[in-house]
Amino acid sequence: MKKILLCFLLLWSSVGKSQKTITFDEMKTITKGAFENIDCDVYIAKDGHSYKVGDTLKIGRPSSSKTFAFISTGSAMGGLHSLEVGSSGKNTIIKKLYVNGTRKSGFYMCAKTSGYCDICGNNFIDFEQAIESGELQTMGMTREQAIAKLKEAKDLVDLGMMSKEDYEKLKAELTPLIMNK
């Protein structure tokens, strides 16, 4: 009886810890109600990199001269306001990943992240817009970086410092990013 109970508890604990992953492409097919939340543990962004709860993100530069358009912060007094320029270069930890939006406006991935101090509020990030504008430094690479890396690899093949097979693997990996797919 103890063995059966132990097996049941192990099975139950492993089911409770399964990770839910949402990709950028899946965002186009999501259907949810206006007040329904869709949370996930892992998000695979347009740049192909996966971001998960617990990851550390680096805040980039504001898209306007003094504030961030796609990263907001909550204050102790309540309400949201744009992050200020002094936040550039600071790290923040992902606490929650969730889908926001409506069928009419479209759905997008958001992240709730930690503030920078004990009295700072949480940050709320429109993930893809923040990456695209440079407000969030991506862990992946830009299209231009992917092209440069592929050109460098081609030069290494020509110099005999990289195998054709390794080049083809890298090319297959970078092609979706270069072609914006």
Image (cartoon, grey):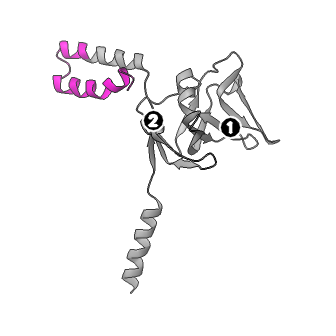
Disc 1 element: loop
Q: Is residue 94 above or below residue 145?
A: below
- Who's the residue at 59% across and 24% down the image? 135
Specify the farthest residue to the right.
77
Residue 144 at x, y percent in the picture: 41, 16
Give the amino acid type for the residue marked by disc 2 in the picture. Phe
Pointer 2 or 1: first along the chain: 2
> Are dots 2 and 1 in contact, CB under 8 Å?
no
Viewer-nearest residue: 35 or 112: 35
> Quarter of the image holding residue 4?
bottom left
Which residue is pictured at 48% across the width and 38% down the height? 27
- Whole-percent x, y for residue 6 in the image: 41, 77
Answer yes or no: is residue 42 visible.
Answer: yes
| Residue that mark 1 sits on | 116
Task: Give the alpha-carbon distance from disc 2 to disc 1, as whole Å.
Answer: 28 Å
Placement of the C terminus among the 4 image quadrants: top left
Tell me: 80 left or right of 33.
right
User: Which numbered mark, 2 or 1, is in the foreground of this view?
Assistant: 2
Residue of label 2: 24
As for residue 156 lying within the magenta part, the answer is yes
Above or below, 32 against 159 in this view is: below
Q: Which residue is at a point 59% across and 49% down the rendered structure image?
A: 37
User: Relative to residue 31, is residue 70 drawn left or right?
Assistant: right
Q: Quadrant of residue 58?
A: top right
Which residue sits at x=58%, y=38%? 110
Mark 1: few, some, or many residues within 10 Å (few <14, many ≥20)?
some
Question: Where is residue 121, by image quadrant?
Answer: top right
Q: Which mark is residue 145?
A: none
Which region is colored magenta?
Answer: 154-181
Q: Is residue 134 magenta?
A: no
